[in-house]
Image (cartoon, rainbow, N blue to C red):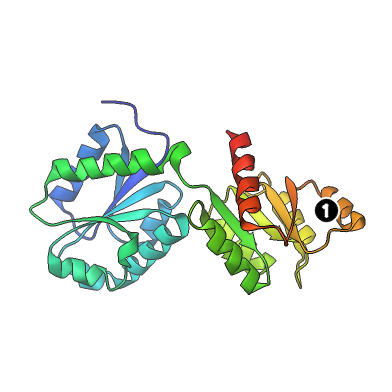
Amino acid sequence: MENKTETGEVLVVCRSESFLAKSIVSKIQSEGIAADISHGDIKDIDRHRDRAELVVLFMDEDIDNMTESLVYIKDLVSDLDRRIILIGDSTEYKTATQSIPEQLIQQWFERPLAMDDLIKCIHKYMEENTGEKRKKTVLIVDDDITYMRTVYEWLKGKYHVGMASSGLQAISYLTKNKADLVLLDYEMPIANGPQVLSMLKSDSQTDSIPVMFLTGHGDRESVLSVVGLSPVDYLLKTIKKEELINKLDTFFAGKK
């Protein structure tokens, strides 16, 4: 057997004790890819949150009783920019897609399962979406919803983008999700940019996340006060789309 990848695991979710689901896990592992199984309990799925690169949902007649778990899986893969492979018949697929939007589904395999095709699909996904090839995650923090959504639209094609409209929302997001960069509004009510950065720096789980400040001020005093907080960069909100993307590309290229 080859060494397992260091990029995470494939999580196979199956409500029942299924021999075929266990065989899928064993086959994935034999291909050198880390894999584990969960029986659909939300707490058990959550244990795999930080490791799951791809979710394989093995559906059966009990799919009707999995609504809460399906919603949780949907939220998990959406938050982490992952995808789901579905295995089951057309009725089970229809039930699953009532909770899981089709844009989150990598592929659907009907039974009887073509195991080789499934493994090829998993290999392709892992090769194209893990490690250095995975999209970087950028969290935008700004109380100006219109501006935040504008930046989201600019970046969503190239990066996985999270949004938070306050410092507290940003902290909450970062306790559950990883971010490669935070674009942080300097001036916000309740907790402003410097206060949010201070909170991030005081927590060992977030102290190494790079932060770029967004500000509407370009005067010397504002610039110097921001630089003193040691962000990785200082960006005026008047920045154009192409310039912002170039800034981020240059930053991430320098991190390699």
Callout 1: few (<14), some (14-19), or many (20+) C-alpha neighbours within 10 Å? some
- Mark 1 belongs to which amino acid? Val
Instruction: List x then y, in percent, for residue 197.
Output: 74, 55
Seen at 61% across and 53% down, the residue is 242
Residue furthest left as drawn? 112
Instruction: List x then y, in percent, for residue 77.
Output: 40, 58
| Vertical placement of residue 133 versus 158, above or below | above
Looking at the picture, tell me which residue is in the foreground, 180 or 171. 180
Residue furthest right as drawn? 221
Q: Could you tell me which quadrant the N terminus lies in?
A: top left
| Residue 168, quarter of the rendered image | bottom right
**Is 114 positioned to the left or the right of 245 in the image?**
left
Q: How many marks?
A: 1
**Is 227 positioned to the left or the right of 1 in the image?**
right
Instruction: List x then y, in percent, for residue 17.
Output: 18, 55
Seen at 12% across and 63% down, the residue is 89
Task: Report whether residue 244 is seen.
Answer: yes
Q: Secondary structure at mark 1?
A: helix
| Vertical placement of residue 251 versus 159, above or below | above
Q: Could you tell me which quadrant the C terminus lies in?
A: top right
Task: Report whether residue 176 is seen.
Answer: no
Residue of label 1: 226
